[in-house]
Amino acid sequence: MTVVVDINVLLDVFQNRQPHYEASARVLSLVCEGRLKGVFPSHGVTTLFYLIAKYGTHSDAMGAVDRVLSFFEVRCLDKNGWLFARRLPMADFEDAVVAGLAAEEGASFIITRNVFDFSNAPVQAINPANFLSGLPAPF
């Protein structure tokens, strides 16, 4: 199963944000174990680095980027993908880009804690805990 993972899920783990850490960490574990194909938007890599370095250390930020690059498919939209995202009826353009990427990748879900803002996305958004509760065994 292919999922696009929003940056807030990664930040939950890399910044140990409670009470969200546990469910987000489990989603990332499934990606790292190869049980999910995790896709992360390329534009989010620099944002991830910036936020982790701002509230942590440069070393922490580089480690987070290395983990994303090791375990996730990092994808970007071409011009047509950006135009598609621009036309989506979503208030936040960055969320629209994530949604456009999810559609382009044929993702089953966008895993985010910001589900409400993806209500008009072409791919269903779901929070980490709800995603995990709906997985069949052996997940």
Image: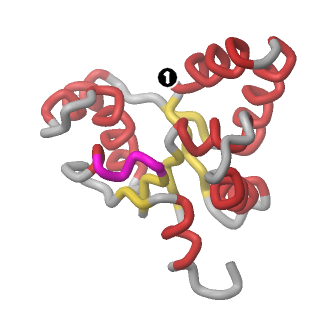
Position of residue 14 in the picture relative to residue 128 (left or right): right
Q: How many neighbours does mark 1 have within 10 angstroms: few (below 14), some (14-19), or many (20 or more)?
A: some
Q: Is residue 134 above or below residue 131?
A: below
The residue furthest front is 19
Q: Which residue is mark 1?
A: 43
Task: Judge whether residue 22 is colored magenta.
Answer: no
Q: Quadrant of residue 93?
A: top left
Callout 1: SS = helix
Residue 21 pos. (x, y %): 69, 51
Residue located at (73% from left, 36% from top): 14
Q: Is residue 2 above or below residue 47?
A: below
Residue 43 pos. (x, y %): 49, 22
Position of residue 138 in the picture relative to residue 2 (left or right): right
Q: Which residues are magenta?
A: 112-116
For badge 1, the amino acid type reads His
Task: Judge whether residue 115 is colored magenta.
Answer: yes
Of residues 68 and 134, the one drawn nearer to the viewer in this rendering: 134
Residue 99 pos. (x, y %): 33, 43
Q: Name the dominant secondary structure of the magenta segment.
A: loop
Residue located at (81% from left, 12% from top): 58
Position of residue 37 in the picture relative to residue 34 (left or right): left
Position of residue 15 in the picture relative to residue 114 (left or right): right
Of residues 137 and 55, the one drawn nearer to the viewer in this rendering: 55
Residue located at (70% from left, 21% from top): 52
Residue located at (51% from left, 56% from top): 3
Quadrant of the image for the N terminus? bottom right
Residue 54 pos. (x, y %): 68, 12
The residue furthest right is 59
Give the tally of numbered discs. 1
Quadrant of the image for the C terminus? bottom right
Q: Quadrant of residue 67?
A: top right
Q: Is residue 61 above or below residue 132?
A: above
